[in-house]
Image: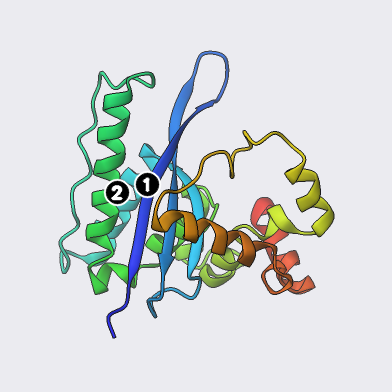
Amino acid sequence: MQQVISVWVRDPRIQKNDFWHAYMDYEICLHTDSVFFTKKMSRVRRRFSEFVWLRQRLQANSMLMAQVPQLPPKNPFFSLNNAQQISERMAGLQRFLEQILQSPQLLSDSCLHLFLQSELSMAKMEACAEGRTRYSVAQAVQCCGIRRFLSQEALQKDSNISGDSDSDSSECRGSESQFKEDLALKQTSPDHLGTEQEQRVCSSLDSA
């Protein structure tokens, strides 16, 4: 039976560092039944510079034994307000990930799993992949989303906030809609909340 790995790059959002500096990030939705992934559904947000980091790490780690696909070219005139440029970049980023996910060698890279299924920064992803953190790659992946759903009370509070919240403001279309529903159920189930020990590990992700 053929294993499926579906990935979508969607929902571009402008994030502001301060009054003068802003960047755009994108939501990455992953849905799979592949044995390469212990977590079958996930959502994270990544910016273009993190995609560049991922490609560099994959290229270095593969030692030329695997062909790492190209990213869409960096446009010096890229505008956060140009819908066509944003759409073209998203399509290019999705093709990049789809091609990576077709390579068994690249699929075994810890940096890829942390990029797709953790909320760690580039520095923390690199440290975790090299074994320089108190938590493992598997723990970082498992904790993605747990901190946002530590209790039913927190979830209820979030549901009362405007529908423009960062995680649920727009819906996936087609098969993505079902993926979103399944993911929401998984994230709010008692099993997904993790044990007390898992929650302590997750808390350490922020302090490490």
Quarter-of-image position of residue 160: top right
Q: What is the x, y in percent for residue 74?
A: 24, 31
- Residue 7 versus residue 110 in the image, above or below: above
- Residue 121 versus residue 169 in the image, above or below: below
Q: Secondary structure at mark 1?
A: strand
Q: Is residue 175 left or right of residue 166?
A: left
Q: Amino acid at mark 2?
A: Gln
- Name the residue nearer the viewer: 42 or 23: 42
Q: What is the x, y in percent for residue 43?
A: 50, 54
Q: Residue at x 52, y 56 (%)?
A: 180
Q: Amino acid at mark 1?
A: Val
Q: Which residue is tagged 1?
A: 9
Pick the quarter of the image with the C terminus. Answer: bottom right
Q: Is residue 166 visible?
A: yes
Q: Is residue 134 visible?
A: no
Which of the marked residues, 1 or 2, is nearer the chain's N terminus?
Answer: 1
Q: Residue at x 32, y 20 (%)?
A: 82
Q: Secondary structure at mark 2?
A: helix
Disc sitting over residue 133 in the figure: none
Q: Which residue is tagged 2?
A: 94
Q: Residue furthest bottom?
A: 1
- Name the residue nearer the viewer: 40 or 69: 40
Q: CB atoms at circles 1 and 2 under 8 Å apart?
A: yes
